[in-house]
Image (cartoon, rainbow, N blue to C red):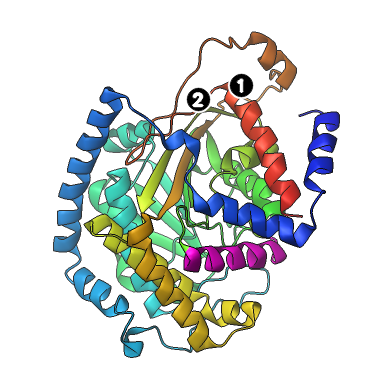
Amino acid sequence: MGSHQSAIIKKKLSASPPGQRDRDFAIKQQKSSPSSLQSDSATRSLSMQQSRNSQTETLKNVELKVGHINTLVAKTWNPNDPKSWEPEMREYHELQNSDYMLPNDAAEQDRLEMQHYIFRAAFQGDIVCPSVRKLIAKSALKILDVGCANGFWLEHVKKSNSLAECHGVDISTALFDQSTENNGISLKFGNILEILPYEDNTFDFVHERLLVLGIPREKFPDVIKELIRVTKPGGWIELVEMDIVIYNAGPYSQTLTTALFDGLHERGLDSYGATNLLFYVKEATDNVENQEERVLHLSIGGNSKMGILFGADWKAGILGVEDWMHKAMGISRDEYRQLCQGCYLEWGEHKSFAQVRALYFRVKKQNNGSHQSKSQKNLSANPSVHAYSDSVVTHVMLPSDVEEQDRLEMQHYIYLTVSR
């Protein structure tokens, strides 16, 4: 993106006061889904129906494997019973060099385990990348999960792929489950904002999921560089993130997510971390290839099993930051809980959803420095031919080729500009 074009964007955006500009931008994003959601393709509709059928089967398995899940949903989703809300005192990470906002107590572990099953059902497996799925079925891959919590994701990977050598790092060793470690999974302390406790070129596959609330915008490219450092040449990296935005938001949700947008901005965090993953990778390196992404738009609330579970996940998540949010908004705990209650009651009515992106790519086997410049790539691009991303639940009809990356890069600068 040229400096002249960037300057024009900044000039136009500076017409309104920064604070109002941020809030208007957040509200605009919440009120409606991206235009790319519109698709009348019969082929894609059939594919979506097949995906839903597969998700139904997976969700049935969820209920069988987690017998307490409906009890958990019922317990955490009674907005009219104050006793059903989370306790006021939560336990948080105490590490100085960490911006992670969510708790690290037992209630948070319950939420993360439920969330794991939701994502497993939505993506139809523990691993999204098709190439890694094929490799792990026949090879003894060395795998690292960054931000592993209690090792729940690794445990499921190990159960399905006994040959895999599984390792996990997290900033809270208190979360580690001894039974997981007894199953041949190595868990150790590690902070992704610093140097991971591994040598260069160690792992065949590196996985990171939902750390957007712990990685500052400015450090995201460095985090990706560190993930690449510990990955073998020819190895794969998979990043799964979610925008901290409620799309199709009602008035309560607009109030909440606008406050989250402002609060995350002040902490240097990115509400649109999923949307911006591509740009963080581009800022970090050009030493990757075979880059693809899948985009999900998951219902929050409503009558479907997926919506109920994901609504429970969101409800527990926004209550998990209650201690910080009620102070940031200048309201009492009771008022904040009433706001959360209002969000819950309107999600189904407004057909609210969240955007989740899985981005995966391979580290190049050789990095000889002979990479095309951006201008060279543009010259070689054929404007009449586009490559498209695939998706589950909702198919996003935007290309995933060089021209689309240029457009998204400009969009990225817009996001960064309004966030300053």
Q: Is residue 306 above or below residue 2?
A: below
Type of the residue with mark 1 = Glu
Q: Is residue 181 above or below residue 359?
A: below
Q: Position of residue 155 (x, y in %)?
A: 31, 58
Q: Position of residue 210 (x, y in %)?
A: 48, 56
Quadrant of residue 388 within the rendered picture: top left
**Of 342 and 266, the residue lying toward us:** 342
Looking at the rendering, the stretch of residues picked out in magenta corresponds to 251-268
Question: On the rendered structure, is 273 left or right of 218?
Answer: left
Q: Which secondary structure class fits the magenta region best?
A: helix
Type of the residue with mark 2 = Pro
Q: Residue at image x 66%, y 60%?
A: 23
Q: Using the image, tell me which numbered label, if any, was put on residue 399.
A: 2
Q: Residue at image x 38%, y 72%?
A: 109
Question: On the rendered structure, is 54 left or right of 219?
Answer: left
Q: Is residue 249 above or below residue 55?
A: below
The quadrant of the image that shows the C terminus is bottom right
Q: Residue at image x 44%, y 61%?
A: 148
Count of labels shown? 2
Q: Position of residue 350 (x, y in %)?
A: 38, 57
**Of 58 and 129, the residue lying toward us:** 58
User: What is the crowding at mark 1: few (fewer than 14 residues within 10 Å), some, or many (at least 20)?
Assistant: some
Label 1 sits on residue: 403
The reply to whether callout 2 and callout 1 are in contact (CB within 8 Å) is: yes
Q: Secondary structure at mark 2?
A: loop
Say whether residue 265 is visible.
Answer: yes
**Of 160 and 12, the residue lying toward us:** 12
